[in-house]
Image (tube, helix red, strand yellow):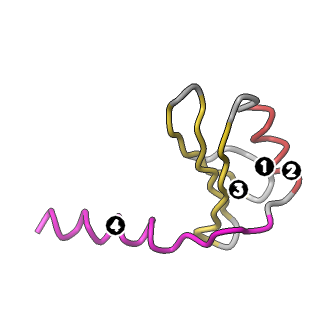
Amino acid sequence: MITATVLLVLAYFFGNRKKKVSVPEMVEASFKNQYPYAEEVTWYQPRNDKYEAYFSAQEVKKSVWYNASGERIF
C-alpha cells in the first residue's frame, strides 16, 4: 500500500510538469539572484501559480519552487 501511494505521488508531481513555460520576471530574477551559478535550467509549471526550476549547480542536480511573486516556497 505504501509503495502504491509513493508511486502515485511521484506520478502526480513528475507527470504534471509542463515544459517551456513562460516564467514571470520576478520569479526568474529571484532565481538568478539565489543561484547565480545555475546551469541547464529547465522551468516547469506544475500548478497555475507555482513554478519549478530544475537545474545543475556545482555538478549537483537541484529543484526549487517559487510562487508567482518570486518567493521561494520549496
Residue 69: x and y, percent?
80, 54
Q: Which of 57 and 31 lies nearest the eye of the viewer?
A: 57
Vertical order, 66 against 35 (above or below): below
SS at circle 1: loop
Q: Which mark is residue 70?
A: 1
Q: Nearer the viewer, mark 4 or mark 3?
A: 4
Indicate left or right for 50 with 68 as reference: left
Q: Main secondary structure of the magenta part?
A: helix
Vertical order, 28 against 51 (above or below): above
Residue at figure coordinates x 67%, y 44% from the top left: 72
> Gap in Å between the C-alphas at discs 3 and 1?
6 Å
Indicate left or right for 59 with 42 as reference: left
On the image, which quarter does residue 29 sit in?
top right
Indicate left or right for 42 with 21 as reference: left
Residue at figure coordinates x 10%, y 69% from the top left: 1
Which stretch appears magenta? 1-22
Q: Which mark is residue 9?
A: 4
Instruction: Name which residue type carries label 4.
Output: Val
Q: Is residue 10 magenta?
A: yes
Q: Which mark is residue 26?
A: 2
SS at circle 2: helix
Q: Which mark is residue 14?
A: none
On the image, which quarter does residue 56 sit in?
top right
Categorize mark 1 by other alpha carbons within 10 Å: few (<14), some (14-19), many (20+): some
Categorize mark 4 by other alpha carbons within 10 Å: few (<14), some (14-19), many (20+): few
Residue 9: x and y, percent?
34, 66
Q: Which mark is residue 67?
A: 3
Farthest residue, direction top = 58
Looking at the image, is mark 2 or mark 4 earlier in the sequence?
4
Categorize mark 2 by other alpha carbons within 10 Å: few (<14), some (14-19), many (20+): some
Looking at the image, is mark 2 or mark 3 earlier in the sequence?
2
Instruction: Name which residue type carries label 2.
Output: Met
